[in-house]
Image (cartoon, helix red, strand yellow):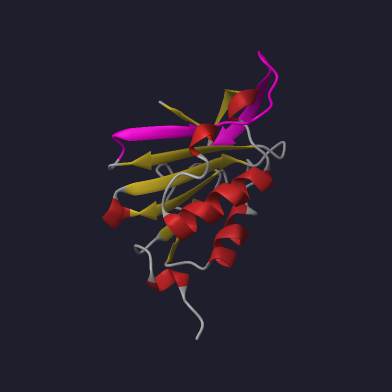
Amino acid sequence: MKLDIAELREPMRIVYDIQGKGILRSPGYVEINNPSLEQLFAVIGLLDGEKTTEVSLESENAGKCMIIGGGNQGLYNVVYSEEYGERNYTLLKERYIEGKVHKLVCGGQIADFEDEICVDLDKVKETVKHYYREQGLFDEKCWKQE
């Protein structure tokens, strides 16, 4: 018997922009309820800093959300929120260059992000896969509470 992980966890949805303006500022966004992990990875693959600048993986019933922004320069910023935004965490890179800054487009806005909080696609996928299955932080030492 094959175990369906989607039946074991809280209902989720993915929301992402398709007009480069971010989810909250754009009428052009897409919502997918109870996505598969493959669908989630495909949506994250759309992040380009132009047309798609933000992906939100939400578990509203649990009060949790993971937001991934960027994609331009092959770098991403990942924020995890729980208790409906009362506690927020930013994913950190293990090795980074102090003082180095990257310009990422997140939520339709270009901004400077320290190298420490700009992660590559492999780290994003590893983190999202854990969140998708466990609905919690992956490797707690890699997060900074805001």
Against 115, residue 68 (above or below) is below
Q: Foreground residue, 118 or 10?
A: 10
Q: Foreground residue, 117 or 53?
A: 117
Against 52, residue 120 (above or below) is above
Kindly indicate the quadrant of the structure image that contains residue 145: top left
Q: Residue at x 39, y 61 (%)?
A: 12
Image position, residue 112 (x, y; %): 59, 22
Q: Quadrant of the C terminus?
A: top left
Q: Determine whether, in the image, residue 145 is placed left or right of residue 129.
A: left
Range of magenta residues? 85-106
Q: Determine whether, in the image, residue 63 is placed left or right of residue 99.
A: left
Q: Residue at x 60, y 50 (%)?
A: 126
Image position, residue 29 (x, y; %): 47, 54
User: Is 140 within the magenta?
Assistant: no
User: Is 99 within the magenta?
Assistant: yes
Q: Residue furthest bottom?
A: 1
- Is residue 107 something that shows in the picture? no
Against 74, residue 41 (above or below) is below
Q: Residue at x 27, y 56 (%)?
A: 61
Image position, residue 129 (x, y; %): 55, 56
